[in-house]
Every structure is written in C-alpha cells, then in structure tokens.
Image (cartoon, rainbow, N blue to C red):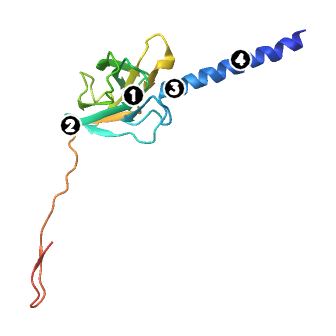
C-alpha cells in the first residue's frame, strides 16, 4: 500500500515544484512574458544599465494588469537583501500608459552603501504571481564622459589645408 502512495506523493511534489517554478518566472518578468520591464530590461537580462544621478530616463514596461504600483528598491551589498524606497508610480485604472519619464534619484539611499537598484511592479500584494522586477541598474553621481574634439591643420605643398 505504501508503494502506491509514494508515486502519488512524488507527483504532487513535482507538480508543486513545477507550479512554483512557473510563478518565479512570472515574478521575475522574463523577456518573453506579457508582463515585463522594457527599460530597465527585464529581470535576468545580461544588461545592467548605469544611470547618472539627475538625468532623465524613460521607464517602460508591458503588462496585462490594469492596476499596479511601481516601486524602487535598493539592493544591499553586504547582505543578500533589498529595501523598498517606496512607490514611484501608481496606475489605478487601465489607461494604456506603458512608460513615464523618471529623474534618476536615490530617495535618500546612499550610493556609497550600494549603487545597485531595481524596480518592482506589484499588481496584487497578496499574490506573488502578480509581481515582477526589472533587472538591476546602477546609479552613479559621476557625470558621463564626454568626448572632446581637437583640431589640427595638415598641409602639404600647394594642397589646401585640411582641418581635422
């Protein structure tokens, strides 16, 4: 009798693992999902953008959810945990908005503690199947390097001078 129950229990465990694994994929908002970030990229993307404090970024997503919040999180370097810095966007009805312009800021989090952040869309606080995260992005207070142009004259005999 125990031999017959074991396969049933094993199948239930496999089903739980399978369903739990699917929920994780939705929660991470992989790049193939109908619910995912576009900028910053979806979770588990190879791209970790670096954004400069004070610049503007267009935060964009696609989702089938009609109401949700987007919050920003600060990833700890010393601990394997993150801290919510609060909601930065709330959609209370389906109005078709899929992006907003965000001024890069840390909401009081210290860059010297960690420059790593991510966004979290939460459509239903009581169900993990209605949550997803962006990939990590870094915030820096150092301005982007700009290229400087130099000019120099080249001349050769009677040929006209060329300024590069």
* Mark closer to the chain start, 1 or 3: 3
Q: Nearer the viewer, mark 2 or mark 3?
A: 3
Relative to residue 104, is residue 83 drawn left or right?
A: right
The disc, 3 or 4, on the residue closer to the chain's N-terminal end is 4
Query: Dot 1 corresponds to which residue?
Result: 77
Residue drawn at x 31%, y 40% is 50
Question: Residue under circle 4?
Answer: 13
Q: Which residue is mark 2?
A: 55
Q: Is residue 112 left or right of residue 17?
A: left
User: How many numbered marks does the figure carry?
Assistant: 4
> Disc 1 or 2, which lies upstream in sequence?
2
The CA span between labels 2 and 3 is: 30 Å
Regarding mark 4 in the picture, which secondary structure is present there? helix
Q: CA distance from mark 3 to mark 4?
A: 20 Å
Label 1 to label 2: alpha-carbon separation: 24 Å
Mark 4 or 1, nearer chain start: 4
Between disc 1 and disc 2, the foreground one is: 2
Q: Position of residue 140 (x, y in %)?
A: 26, 36
* Residue holding disc 3: 26
Disc 2 or 3, which lies upstream in sequence?
3
Observer-nearest residue: 84 or 111?
84
| Helix, strand or loop under label 2 | loop
In this view, the mark in front (1 or 3)? 3
Residue situated in front as seen by the camera: 30 or 66: 66
Vertical side of 152 occupied by 135: above or below: above
Image: 115 above or below 69: below
Q: Residue furthest bottom?
A: 158
Is tag 2's residue or tag 4's residue first in the polypeptide sequence? 4
Where does residue 93 sit, x and y in percent of width and height?
33, 17
Disc 3 on helix, strand or loop? helix
Residue 98 in the image: state x and y as whole percent.
33, 30
Q: Farthest residue in the right direction?
A: 1
């Amino acid at each position: 009798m125990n031999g017959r129950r074991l396969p049933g229990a094993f199948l239930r465990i496999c089903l739980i693992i399978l369903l739990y694994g699917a929920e994780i994929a939705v929660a991470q908002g992989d790049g193939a999902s109908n619910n995912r970030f576009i900028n910053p990229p979806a979770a588990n993307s190879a791209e970790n953008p670096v954004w400069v404090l004070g610049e503007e970024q267009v935060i964009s997503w696609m989702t089938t959810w009609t109401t949700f919040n987007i919050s920003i999180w600060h990833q700890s370097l010393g601990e394997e945990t993150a801290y919510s810095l609060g909601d930065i966007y709330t959609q209370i009805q389906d109005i078709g908005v899929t992006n907003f312009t965000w001024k890069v800021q840390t909401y009081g989090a210290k860059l010297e503690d960690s420059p790593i952040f991510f966004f979290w869309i939460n459509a239903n606080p009581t169900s993990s199947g209605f949550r997803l995260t962006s990939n990590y992005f870094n915030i820096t207070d150092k301005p982007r390097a700009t290229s400087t142009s130099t000019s120099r004259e080249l001349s050769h005999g009677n040929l006209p001078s060329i300024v590069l």
